[in-house]
Amino acid sequence: MPSQLGKTSLSFSNKTTKIFNDFVETATKNEIIAKGPVVLNLIEPLLQTALKIFPPRKRLEDIAREYKKFQLENPNYPTYGIIYGWLNDLIDCKKLYSDGLPSHARVGAFLHAGKFAVDENMILRDAFFFLVLAEKEMESFNQFITLSKIGKNALNEGSYSRMMYMNTNIGSFCRTALVNFYSFVEAFVNGIGLDHLFKNNQKLESKDQEILQGKYKGSYISLEKRLEQFPQIIRPDRKRVLIVTDLSQRKEPYKTFFDEGKEIRDSAVHFSALKEPIVRKPDEWLAKVKQYSKVSLNVAKDFWEASYQTKRYPDYMDLLDYDTLYKIALKRLSISYETKNETIPS
């Protein structure tokens, strides 16, 4: 869960949480009745600070009522978070998350205060994580082959089995990475559509509302059509700037994304002997995924620019920056090996 909460706000949230938790979790009913006013007086300065940091958009009584209802309907919210759009309708959160999170983001509470999660970002980070896993396994595989050639690893039954498992691992990591890169683009496009719908629902025609939910006349529309139609709805000039469905006019990065990557993704998810093969040489797999990782990011960037006419990519997506995402994946892998008291194979 990335964090965007400032130190002052976070200090306020943690202090408030501690006061309430220490009292409510240990106090008896009689103690709550007797000491409640003291606790309320104690947190009054914090409440006034909160009202300045998070100005209410509704009456406090209405906020309290909606929050109570939310707690009853979502008992696991301390673990899974609070939907940002719902929270931002109750209080002004612009000082909480400076980049303006999408409405469907989940923001943390209690121990997770100041953190947030966006599903499309998690899918993208997972894709890079599996790419890094494939690269590290490929390094080990090549090292093993080199040692075998110079006679330090005799190619017996045991070493052959190890080599085959490493070969299989590379394929598994690459297939998973590629599926995640494709899924990220679809999730990112869907997220942009839903965010625009949530924030502009009253201004949109019913047809546009349905399209932004990925449907037309009750049927789901393809990713290709969503890529074309979402920016056209979002842009003030209503101009169609992306051409993806017409194969004769489809350009890069969409050509590679759909013509090559989607075929492999479909084989991995809905395999048939008539589709693209999922058994490939490890170096071929890795080269394909490395290319697709860059193509997928370029599709997301182009879609963002087409929709908002800016190259300032969203902070909540790690700015769609390849190097940043790659370093995060390396950090995840490093922590995993540290937990096991191992070192990353080099």
Image (cartoon, rainbow, N blue to C red):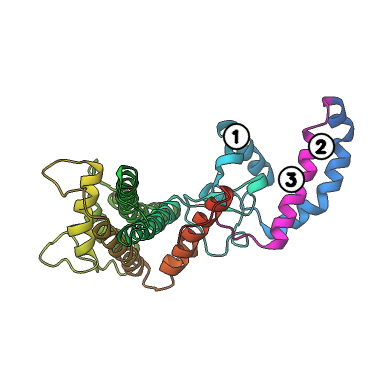
Magenta highlight on residue 240: no
**Which of the 4 image quadrants contains residue 136?**
bottom left
| Label ID, residue 23 | 2
Q: Amino acid at mark 1?
A: Lys
Q: Nearer the viewer, residue 38 or 342?
A: 342
Identify the element where label 1 is drawn.
Answer: helix
Report the mark closest to the observer, 3 or 1: 3
* N-term-proximal mark, 3 vs 2: 3
Q: Residue at x 62, y 59 (%)?
A: 96
Instruction: Identify the element where label 3 is drawn.
Output: helix
Q: How many marks?
A: 3
For marks 3 and 1 on the same chain, the one whose residue lies earlier in the sequence? 3
Report crowding for label 1: few under 14, some 14 to 19, many 20 or more residues within 10 A (C-alpha): few
| 263 w.r.t. 26: above or below | below
Q: Which residue is mark 3?
A: 17
* Precedes in sequence: disc 1 or disc 2: 2
- The crowding category of the residue bearing disc 3, from other C-alpha atoms within 10 Å (few below 14, some 14 to 19, many at least 20), is some
Residue 2 counted in the magenta span: yes
Q: Quadrant of residue 72?
A: top right
- The residue under label 1 is 69
- Nearest the viewer among 218 and 146 is 146
Label 1 – label 2 distance at C-alpha: 22 Å
Q: Nearer the viewer, residue 230 or 12?
A: 12
Amino acid type assigned to the residue bearing label 2 in the image: Phe
Position of residue 29 measured from the top left corner of the image (x, y, whole percent): 82, 25
Instruction: Report the side of 274 relative to 163 (left or right).
Output: left
